[in-house]
Amino acid sequence: MVGYDPKSEVKSISAVEVAVAGSASGFVTRALISPVDVIKIRFQLQIEQLSPRNPLAKYYGILQTAHRIFHEEGLTAFWKGHVPAQLLSVSYGAVQFVTFECLTELVHNATPYNTRNFIVHFVCGGLAACTATMTVQPLDTLRTRFAAQGEPKVYRNLRHAVVTMYQTEGPLTFYRGLTPTIIAIFPYAGLQFSFYNLLQQLYKWVMPPEGMNAGNVKNLVCGSCAGVISKTLTYPFDLFKKRLQVGGFEQARAAFGQVRTYKGLMDCAGQIVREEGPVGLFKGLSPSLLKAALSTGFTFFWYEFFCNLLYALKDTGSTKGQEG
């Protein structure tokens, strides 16, 4: 289902329906994984070592961080920045899947390559993600700012955040962290799509015929594994992106510990290695892997679910029309 497949019977849904399925997948997934994302961002932005032995560390474990956020900021804190995050997920899902389906179909029609090839999915997945990222980067920056701020809040709501950031930091501030994002997103998304396709094929090879009807479980498991593999291989760039996105936002970070200002991607990477050690490049990896497993698994699971649902509705409608 994911990617153009000339042998698939579910290939008659339109680009609009693909966009709807992608948006719906992003919406449901974002609502489910938002708490893990907030914890991950708090870890990534903390300068101090993530260890209970460090008295200056505000956060040092997933459960400890969840308890502290809940105690200090309330349950709703786990959905801080949820409005821009949902706009991000809905828009990103639509653009990414429509672009991916179009690119894989183009490969099938214009080249001799097999559209189910690992490299084809890697390149098409990477390009689709870059296209989606360029489209929604301002929303990602807003989401990060909301998730990063403590109490008292710097931004009251989405409109206040947009106006304040534009007036005080200029329009380019919405694209902070774009360079490491693009550098990271191509291989990350490419590996997601490639490993998802590869794991689906391995699943068919390993699973006995009587177990092949568990399609929903297969999609979830393959998506989760693909997410963990791709996130581990590209994680440091996600960290750089988050650090750069909160530049100019230091006053809201004071309650969380030390703050740093970075001149760019290389300066950010250099400072992290010098001050926090090589292990600092993987701060927040544990919640990130949890998030990647849930996010990628749910994204592919719900995308395939909604595509099949839309196809079934269309097929039912056409059958009734023929009978009438």
Image: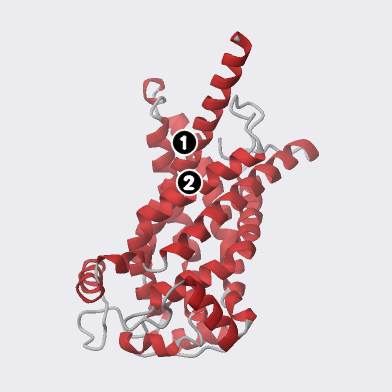
Which of these two is toward me, 257 or 22?
22
* Helix, strand or loop at mark 1: helix
Q: Residue under circle 1?
A: 305
Numbered tag placed on residue 43 in the rendering: none
Residue 290 as seen in the image, left or right of residue 10: left
Residue 66 screen position, x and y as percent: 24, 68
Which of these two is toward me, 213 or 19?
19
Residue 67 as seen in the image, left or right of residue 306: left
Q: Earlier in the sequence, mark 2 or mark 1?
A: 2
Q: Amino acid at mark 2?
A: Ser
Give the image quarter of residue 274: bottom left
Tag 2–tag 1 contact (CB < 8 Å): yes
Residue at image position (54%, 76%) is 162
Q: Quadrant of the C terminus?
A: top right
Residue furthest to the right: 110
Residue furthest to the top: 323
Q: Amino acid at mark 1?
A: Phe
Q: Is residue 225 visible?
A: no
Residue at image position (52%, 72%) is 141
Q: Residue under circle 2?
A: 25
Q: Is residue 40 visible?
A: yes
Q: Quadrant of the N terminus?
A: top right
Residue 111 screen position, x and y as percent: 78, 40
Residue 18 screen position, x and y as percent: 60, 41
Badge 1 local density, few (<14 within 10 Å), some, or many (20+)? some
Residue at image position (61%, 15%) is 321
